[in-house]
Image (tube, helix red, strand yellow):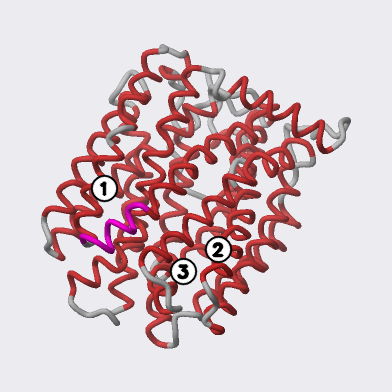
């Protein structure tokens, strides 16, 4: 019988550390999520420039995903996390300074790339640390309950951070949430330094840096693009992630437009807050929804199709309250999808290349963000936010056939089901 986290003290401790790191990271990041687009526009950027700055952020993630994934797989997942907190805190402080100085667009582009570097130290590393540590602690159950708890904790942190960020910005100015983010990241460096240790994974430091990059990259390609079920998930990622990032940030000014008050920053924070609340609900529902279907990919396909329909309707019906309802449904659908996709992906990847393959999958999503965000931002400049959401729905529909192709591979991980369910509430 598969052992659950409730039965294994070591696994419970690992989960608590993971949830603490996720809580701190998401809280720090979400302080600016409700006001980021407004912050960039207030700095003098146009819609095209604001979303192009976001695209440079995703470009930074594309450039550095594989090198930082190699850091996690060859130096250590803990080291990667610690580097991420420092780089991201410094880049966030630079963002605040550029806002004070009304810096030109090229400066925003450069620092956005640096922000991307900071996030790539996190992507893949923390998730790989969690999965390997759980396996080393003799936990043999399904991963969905663990990732679902992460969704719930992340949603709570995002809800608190996005609402507080909007309120703080309205009471002070748009720059203060960025300072709060930098401060929390420094605190998380201290927490991770004291609590996080690489467990169930021994970094391979036998090769030099360049040779290690080549070795791990070849392994990640073999177990990523060379593995058919993983490959099709990766090919779907540019369309889902690229549109998702745009929608999240475009809804800030769009809700203000529908509300009728461009200075109601707390209303802009509603977009992030509703996504956060949806994430909590989705995290609760994901394990239950998973049990309704024999295959994980069935849920992924349904969630993708529902998301397309919701975006189309969101762009067609220009009503504030309807938009809130549709945004909630869109967030819940995406949040149910996420832990199931992560569990499916991790069950397809060997431990030695886990962090790099996960980073490679994130890279594919960011590739979509580079092209899709500024393109949809330009559509918003020319035809309005509503029409850009409709186009976003059409683009995200391209991902659904790739998910169907992943399903067609009939991978054992697609039908994996634990013998024992995790019933303990989030730590």
Q: Earlier in the sequence, mark 2 or mark 3?
A: 3
Which residue is the site of mark 3? Answer: 32
Dominant secondary structure, magenta: helix
Q: Which residues are magenta?
A: 375-383
Q: Nearer the viewer, residue 133 or 304?
A: 304
Q: Is residue 77 left or right of residue 259?
A: right
In the image, what residue occupies the spot 34% across and 69% down? 269
In the image, what residue occupies the spot 42% across and 12% down? 409
In the image, what residue occupies the spot 32% across and 58% down? 378
Q: Which mark is residue 344?
A: none
Q: Earlier in the sequence, mark 1 or mark 2?
A: 2
Is 130 situated above or below 231? below
Which corner quadrant of the image does residue 163 belong to? bottom left
Which residue is the site of mark 2? Answer: 109
Q: What's the CA distance linking mark 1 and mark 2?
A: 30 Å
Of the residues tagged 2 and 3, which is closer to the observer?
Answer: 2
Mark 3 and mark 1 residues within 8 Å of each other at the beta carbon: no
Which corner quadrant of the image does residue 49 belong to? bottom left
Which corner quadrant of the image does residue 352 belong to? top right
Q: What's the CA distance linking mark 3 and mark 1?
A: 21 Å
Q: Earlier in the sequence, mark 3 or mark 1?
A: 3
Q: What's the CA distance linking mark 2 and mark 3?
A: 18 Å
Q: Which mark is residue 330?
A: 1
Q: Nearer the viewer, residue 66 or 382?
A: 382
Magenta stretch: residue 382 in it? yes
Of the residues tagged 1 and 2, which is closer to the observer?
Answer: 2
Q: Is residue 64 left or right of residue 1?
A: right
Image location (x, y in percent) of residue 233 = 44, 28
Q: Residues within 10 Å of mark 1 (few under 14, many from 20)?
A: many
Is 62 situated above or below 405? below
Image location (x, y in percent) of residue 101 = 56, 84
């Amino acid at each position: 019988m598969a052992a659950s986290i409730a039965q294994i003290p070591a696994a419970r401790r690992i989960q608590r550390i993971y949830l603490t790191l996720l809580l701190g990271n998401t809280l720090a990041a979400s302080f600016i999520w409700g006001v980021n687009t407004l912050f960039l526009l207030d700095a003098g950027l146009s819609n095209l420039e604001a979303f192009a700055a976001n695209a440079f952020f995703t470009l930074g993630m594309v450039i550095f995903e594989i090198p930082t994934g190699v850091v996690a797989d060859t130096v250590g997942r803990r080291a990667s996390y610690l580097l991420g907190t420092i780089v991201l805190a410094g880049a966030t402080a630079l963002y605040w300074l550029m806002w004070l100085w009304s810096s030109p667009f090229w400066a925003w582009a450069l620092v956005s790339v640096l922000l991307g570097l900071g996030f790539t130290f996190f992507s893949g590393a923390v998730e790989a640390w969690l999965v390997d540590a759980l396996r080393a602690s003799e936990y043999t159950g399904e991963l969905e309950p663990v990732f679902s708890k992460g969704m719930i904790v992340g949603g709570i942190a995002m809800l608190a951070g996005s609402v507080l960020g909007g309120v703080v910005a309205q009471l002070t100015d748009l720059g203060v949430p960025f300072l709060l983010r930098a401060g929390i990241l420094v605190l998380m460096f201290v927490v991770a330094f004291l609590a996080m240790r690489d467990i169930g994974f021994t970094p391979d430091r036998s090769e030099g840096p360049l040779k290690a990059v080549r070795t791990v990259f070849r392994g990640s390609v073999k177990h990523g693009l060379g593995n058919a079920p993983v490959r099709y998930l990766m090919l779907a990622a540019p369309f889902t992630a690229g549109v998702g990032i745009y929608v999240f940030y475009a809804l800030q000014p769009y809700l203000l437009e529908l509300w009728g008050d461009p200075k109601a920053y707390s209303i802009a924070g509603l977009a992030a807050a509703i996504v956060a609340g949806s994430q909590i609900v989705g995290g609760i529902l994901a394990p239950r929804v998973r049990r309704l279907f024999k295959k994980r990919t069935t849920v992924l396909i349904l969630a993708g199709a529902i998301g397309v329909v919701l975006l189309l309707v969101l762009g067609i019906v220009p009503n504030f309250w309807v938009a809130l309802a549709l945004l909630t449904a869109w967030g819940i659908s995406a949040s149910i999808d996420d832990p199931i996709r992560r569990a499916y992906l991790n069950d397809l990847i060997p431990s030695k290349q886990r962090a790099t393959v996960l980073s490679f999958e994130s890279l594919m999503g960011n590739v979509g963000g580079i092209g899709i965000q500024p393109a949809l931002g330009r559509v918003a400049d020319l035809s309005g936010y509503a029409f850009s959401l409709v186009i976003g729905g059409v683009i995200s529909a391209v991902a659904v056939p790739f998910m169907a192709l992943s399903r067609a591979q009939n991978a054992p991980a697609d039908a994996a089901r634990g013998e024992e369910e995790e019933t303990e509430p989030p730590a």
